[in-house]
Image (cartoon, rainbow, N blue to C red):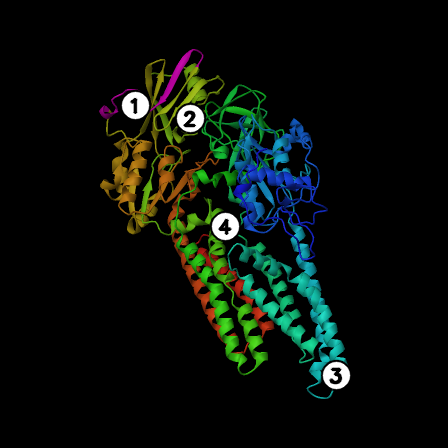
Amino acid sequence: MALKFDQYQAGDTTTNQDNKLVCFHCGDTCPDQSIAIGDKYFCCHGCKTVFEILNTNELCDYYSIEDTPGITPKQDLIADRFAYLDDETVKNQVVSFSDGKTEKVTLYTPAMHCASCIWLLEKLHDMDSRVYSSVVNFPRKEVTISYNREEMNLSEVAALISSLGYEPLVNLDTIGDREQSAAEKKLYLKIGLAGFAFGNVMILSFPEYLSRTGDVDPVFKMVFGYLSLLLSLPVLLFATRDYYSSAWAGLKSKTVNIDVPITLGIGMLFLRSAWEIVTQTGPGYLDSFTGLVFFLLVGRLFQQKTYEVLSFERDYKSFFPLSVTRKIDSVEAVVPVSKLKPGDRIVVRNLELIPADSVLLKSEAYIDYSFVSGESNPVSKKAGDFIYAGGRQVGTTIELEVIKESSQSYLTQLWNHDVFNKPRFSRLNALVNQVSHYFTFGVLAIAIGASLYWYQFDTTVAIKVFTAVLIVACPCALALSSPFALGTALRIFGRKGFYVKNTETVEALSKIDTIIMDKTGTLTETRQDIIEFAGDTLSTGEQKLVKSLVQHSTHPLSQKIFQALDVPAEILVENFEEITGSGIQGNSRDHNIKIGSGSWLGLDTDSSSTEDLKTRVYLDIDGQIKGSFLISNVYRKGLRPLLTRLSEQFKMFLLSGDTEREKATLVNLFGNEQALHFRQTPENKLDFVSHIQGEGAHVLMVGDGLNDAGALRASEVGIAITDDVTAFSPASDAILTGKNLHLLESFIKMSKATTSVIVASFTISVIYNIVGVSFAVAGKLSPLVSAILMPASSISVVVFTTLTTSLRARLMKLT
């Protein structure tokens, strides 16, 4: 191994304060100088190996993040140590995705402890070219790694991160179900400790309290003072550890967070008290110190419990409406994915999402894993092959058997994949970030200035003022206003069948000034149409051919034709293809069938009677036009008053792929002929959205999510209207059930009201901080009262935003 010693010179191995040789990598004491590279000494071969890996890959900047940041690999690095992970039975429980080329795994690494760990674990692709990417989830101590399955085994992935000192902990019984209760248990323990110390220090302080009315033996004061100090030490060293750790971590990353002034206030109070007790110059303030910590921790617990009750982290089973067709004894029924169990048979049509890990039962499938891996080329699967959740079928309908319960949180994560996220500028987030950046520096300046002023008159008051200012000022309320208000709006929307992708979408919806709508499947009902066939009489066999073909498509017109034909769909269709915006085609029993628009089939549709108000879908069998399905559209309930109200507030446009047959009806609905555009291809719709955006418009696109995917993706907000939630467009920002389209105006108004609530909560937070700091600077606020007010302010703002947002929704009749 060729080492490049010239690339990192700083931080050579030195001796510690006890004059002992320390390891260059982890900082532990070296037993001797036997393990060394140049002038760098290591405590074990594991640390030496890690350094060699980093040095070879030119990653020694790792050591500049902090001194001796490494972790000693506690066991020898044996090549086959993780060989058990390559067993297919074990591997299938650990790997979250595999398409034959790329695999993705999430590993729990409890040794992860600092910013250096994150930096190193996210540089795996630089150490091994077989690794595509690695992303750390620090709070959960997990790293998600994507790698080349053809060149790298799972055991090698585990060995790679183990060689860096981050051995993965693989527990096959609890994968994906790791509890977060340890931190909460520790919080209760800290509260108990602080409360015990607070109560006892208060009792031990009675001699000082009583000294104001009579003489107390100085020996009692001294003994009780030292006992109070002894009781307070565990509070300082254990109960306040989270504050010190957070403040230190922030400072190391060159960030001054809210825990910095809290830590300074706590530290100042304890040190001053300890000095007075030891030097016998005063009684100290340990009763205030322990009480301060106790109320801070109680406030943190109360905040945590309040947030859990009001949390906007959605229950994915109610938030995400995805359902699937389940087949029992040849009878199909649409059910929520949450009800799927291993062993269930499901039917997945063209472009529908596979909601759970499954096995293909028969025929072939072509799976598009672009939601998971970003790779859009469909992967061929045969009967008996394993198919991961999140894939999308491209082609004919397939049947699968579920082998794992569906994870809707995982499916929603796919919906929020970076591939589908839109670049948005959030003024609310920008404001919060800007205020938070300067807030702590301002508080520190005020605390120092006020304490210096009071120091001239009374040292005791100066310390009290310094501590009170640092504790009472809190930007948390500012940071919490936005997520809780927007999150409450998400829950309210979800109850009304409006499923929004994320909180940023709510803010974006409040800014729109232009609305574009599709017609078929958006403004029209999908199940209440009158359908007839104009042309040659279709034989029973031909009807079966047609129904067998359209059953594979999720397009609203295909589904209408499927429901209208009273024959079984029992014929096998091969080479199924759906041409977006045109039609579908396939082969069956030596017949070639095409169903779609007249222009796609080479017909001059302009010659059709403009008096015919019905939508036409043409049928071609073996190159011969058999006729057309005439579909009388039924417009959705409440559409006319909705469009009237929206037209008064926004610019309105209709983009339809249909002909002008229903132009008169639509002019009556929209009130403006210039706003109607017909014969629009998916490309035309995308171009139109881009054009008006170039003129400064903020666009809301409402479509069926199929032919409108490009326009939905390009618009500021894209809403997919659906009656069957088995299919959805990842390009959309929200899904709205068709029966609730008439509530669209209320949803937009609610988004605007939510942003106004956030502004109001910002104002309340600012007023609280100004008033609280003013009283603290004037010396009229004790540190103990400040400790109560700080969490109370955050809780009050959270409750205000949640209740006010809910009240506004009730006034709009959304609850």
SS state under label 2? helix
Q: CA distance from mark 3 to mark 2?
A: 98 Å
Residue 523 within the magenta-colored segment of the rendering:
no
Badge 2 is on which residue?
564
Badge 1 is on which residue?
598
Residue extent of the magenta highlight: 588-607
Give the amino acid type for the residue marked by disc 2 in the picture.
Answer: Ala
Give how far across and how far down residue 512 sits, in percent. 34, 49
The earlier-in-sequence mark between 3 and 2 is 3
Q: CA distance from mark 1 to mark 2?
A: 21 Å
Q: What residue is rendered at 61% in x and 38% in y? A: 161
SS state under label 4? helix
Badge 3 is on which residue?
218
The earlier-in-sequence mark between 1 and 3 is 3
The earlier-in-sequence mark between 2 and 4 is 4
Q: CA distance from mark 1 to mark 4?
A: 44 Å
Tell me if 418 is positioned left or right of 583 in this view.
right
Give the amino acid type for the residue marked by disc 4 in the picture.
Answer: Arg
Give the amino acid type for the residue marked by disc 3 in the picture.
Answer: Pro
Category of crowding for the residue at label 1, using alpha-carbon neighbours closer than 10 angstroms: few (below 14), some (14–19), many (at least 20): many
The image quadrant where one finds the N terminus is: top right
- Discs 1/2, front: 1
Q: Is residue 565 visible?
A: yes
Q: CA distance from mark 1 to mark 3?
A: 104 Å
Give how far across and how far down residue 473 sits, in percent. 51, 67
Residue 115, label in figure: none
Give the amino acid type for the residue marked by disc 1 in the picture.
Answer: Gly
Badge 4 is on which residue?
491
The earlier-in-sequence mark between 4 and 3 is 3
Give how far across and how far down residue 393 sits, in percent. 48, 27
